[in-house]
Amino acid sequence: MNSRNRQIPLFFSMTFNFLNVYMLTQVGRSPDTVRSYRDCLTIFARFITEVKGLKLDRFSFEECTRDFIFDFLDWLRENGCKPGTRNQRLAVLNSYLKYAADNDVSLYPISFSVGTIPYAKVSKEILRCLDERETAAILSAPPASKPGIRDQMLLILLYDSAMRVSELLNLQVDDIKMDPKNGYLRVVGKGSKERIIPLSELTIAHLQQYMRLFHDAEEPSTNLFYTVIKGHADRMSCGNAERIVQKYADLARKEVSTIPLSVYPHMIRRTRATYLVQHDVRI
């Protein structure tokens, strides 16, 4: 390694401590946030090696110039990344460079230079919600089979609780109170903040049926929703939940043609929130 790289630290030399010590312990970011930051740095590493043809074990902070980051953002745009996604990638790199500069004062000029890169303008588009007929068609689309009952339970809870999909999939069996008159979920959301979400009697009835089928005396998992792979039960992934939502939206579209081609968990959350606001429910 040449003398310049001995003086300027390698770019990824602080990554482990940044993600696992600083982000998780010192500033208390959630595991999902840390995972998002890790994904961004992984994409940046791929840009360095596959697009720029550089070696990670020789790439130094000194080479992470303002122009280099502009090239990275242009590459993201050319590959279909929307302005909001590009802004998120830039914010992660800024956060990492500020952390690096706090640990090595020689990196402050680099951090400051990259920090002057402007964020892309994000147009305010009207986000699509489902109407009541479309929502009802999707929620009733799953069949009465055991997998269908699981999928319908997931859809019903997404809608009735207006949770984020990550919050739903992090639910444990002990987080649920199934009292028909006073049922609720205990949810841990962003910033590890806990909140209580009341459930309707109909949702409780569905939950009772679901629990009998999927959480009997020999329950395979404490996760409310789980998948079994090679005999091992684990938390259902967000990707799997997204596929379930899209699957039944596609099925329901045969009956209600106005259902959008792309339906995803956050659209269901937004739909429920809009419904509550329209019916004068306090957020």
Image: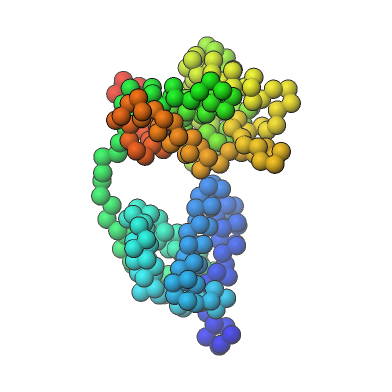
> Could you tell me which residue is drawn at 36 percent across and 30 percent down?
253
Choose top left, top right, bottom left or bottom right for residue 146.
top right
> Could you tell me which residue is drawn at 34 percent across and 38 percent down?
261
Considering every residue shown, the one lying at the far bottom of the view is 3
Give residue 65's position: percent from left, percent from top. 40, 75
Vertical order, 149 against 76 (above or below) = above
Q: Judge from the rendering whether residue 35 lies leftward or rightward of residue 172; answer left or right.
A: left
> Could you tell me which residue is drawn at 55 percent across and 69 percent down?
12
Considering every residue shown, the one lying at the far front of the view is 254
Vertical order, 208 against 87 (above or below) = above
Foreground of the two, 45 or 106: 45
> Could you tell me which residue is drawn at 54 percent across and 52 percent down?
35
Whether residue 189 is visible to the viewer of this picture, yes or no, is no
Vertical order, 91 against 108 (above or below) = above
Foreground of the two, 275 or 145: 145
Whether residue 230 is visible to the viewer of this picture, yes or no, is yes
Q: Quadrant of the C terminus?
A: top left
Q: Quadrant of the N terminus?
A: bottom right
Foreground of the two, 137 or 219: 137
Give residue 151's position: percent from left, percent from top. 52, 29
Considering every residue shown, the one lying at the far top of the view is 181
